[in-house]
Each structure stands twice: as C-alpha cells, then as structure tokens.
Image (cartoon, rainbow, N blue to C red):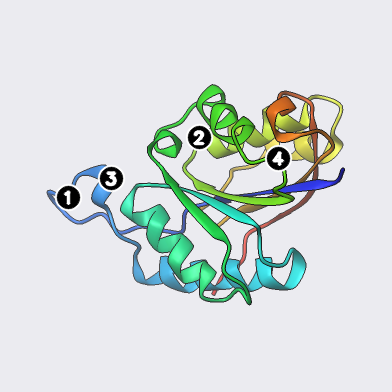
Amino acid sequence: MNRKLVVLRHAKSDWPIGVPDQDRPLGRRGKRDAAAAGRWVAEHVGTPDLAVVSTARRTVQTWEVAAAELSGDPTVSLDDRVYDATVRDLLEVLTGVPKATECVLLVGHNPGVQELVLALTGPGDDEGRLLAETKYPTSGLAVLTVDCKWPDLGPGKARLVDFVVPRG
C-alpha cells in the first residue's frame, strides 16, 4: 500500500483591478511555470489517477496547463472546498478519495497546501521540517508517500519524498 499524494500550489496569478480573488487568472509567468510543473510530474511521478482542483480560476488554469504535459487523462474533481481551505477541509476532501486510487494530485492555495503537507508529514519527518522553514512558492510541488488508506489519512500519516519548484 504505497499511495502518492502530489500537492501543487497554483502557478503565479495576475492581479487585474476589480477582479474578485476567485476569478484571478494565471499571469504569463504562471502559464510557463504550470507547464514546467506538468512536465516535472510527468517525468518524476507519472499521470495521477485523480486530480482534485480548487474551483478558483487560477487553480483550474494551472491544472489545465499542467495536464497538457501528462501522457494520460486522470479523473478530475473540481472541489469548492479546496479554495481558502484549512488543513481540516483538505483532509476531509482527501479522506473521501476512492479507495482504489493510488496517486492523487491536489491543486490548491497557500497557506492551506503548506499546512497540509506539514500536518501529514508530522514532526518526525526531516524533509517536512525543512519545508516548515521555507516558503511554499507558486508552482511548488510536494510529493508524499501515504502508507494508509485514504479514509485513514491524517497527521503524521505521510512522508515527504520530494519538494520542487519547477520554472518555465
């Protein structure tokens, strides 16, 4: 039982005047970086079984650009709960993942994604502790191994095996 969770913070967004936060699009750099993130996932992880994506425009666009770099077509779930989510919200989403799913890619926002990775890795994970001391930048990717069933996912139940910030 060696499941993987890939946690991707959305790529760099634009800040158009008068546009609500949820409707902010990716900026030019964000589109390049999202493609680089997709290439990295394709090369180092492969195509996930399931992508869980916040409904915010910048996360949907991050997923669409990254997904174009993958060789397969995972199931995609757009989930309102991922926008402005706490660790508890994100755990609720992830514990509902179908049992047969081996690899999940979550596309979300900070601070929720960083707090999720820190909670899942727990204090005994040296790599996870290093992440606590750094910023989780846009297009940052954390790859975790999960040694339990999705419904049992919680604090300390994963190990950080990689953290990268692909740039395009």
Q: Which residue is mark 1?
A: 19
Mark sitting earlier along the chain (4/1): 1
Q: Is residue 76 left or right of residue 163?
A: left
Q: Are marks 4 and 1 in contact (CB under 8 Å)?
A: no
Q: Is residue 14 left or right of residue 53?
A: left
Amino acid at pointer 2: Pro
Q: Which residue is mark 2?
A: 111
Of the 4 image quadrants, the one containing the C terminus is bottom right
Q: Which mark is residue 22?
A: 3
**How far across and how far down the image is residue 72, in percent?**
62, 72
Q: Which residue is mark 4?
A: 99
In the image, residue 99 sits, relative to residue 90, either above or below, namely: below
Q: In terms of secondary structure, where does tag 1 sit? A: loop
Q: Are marks 4 and 3 in contact (CB under 8 Å)?
A: no
**How far across and how far down the image is residue 90, in percent?**
54, 32
Q: Which mark is residue 104?
A: none
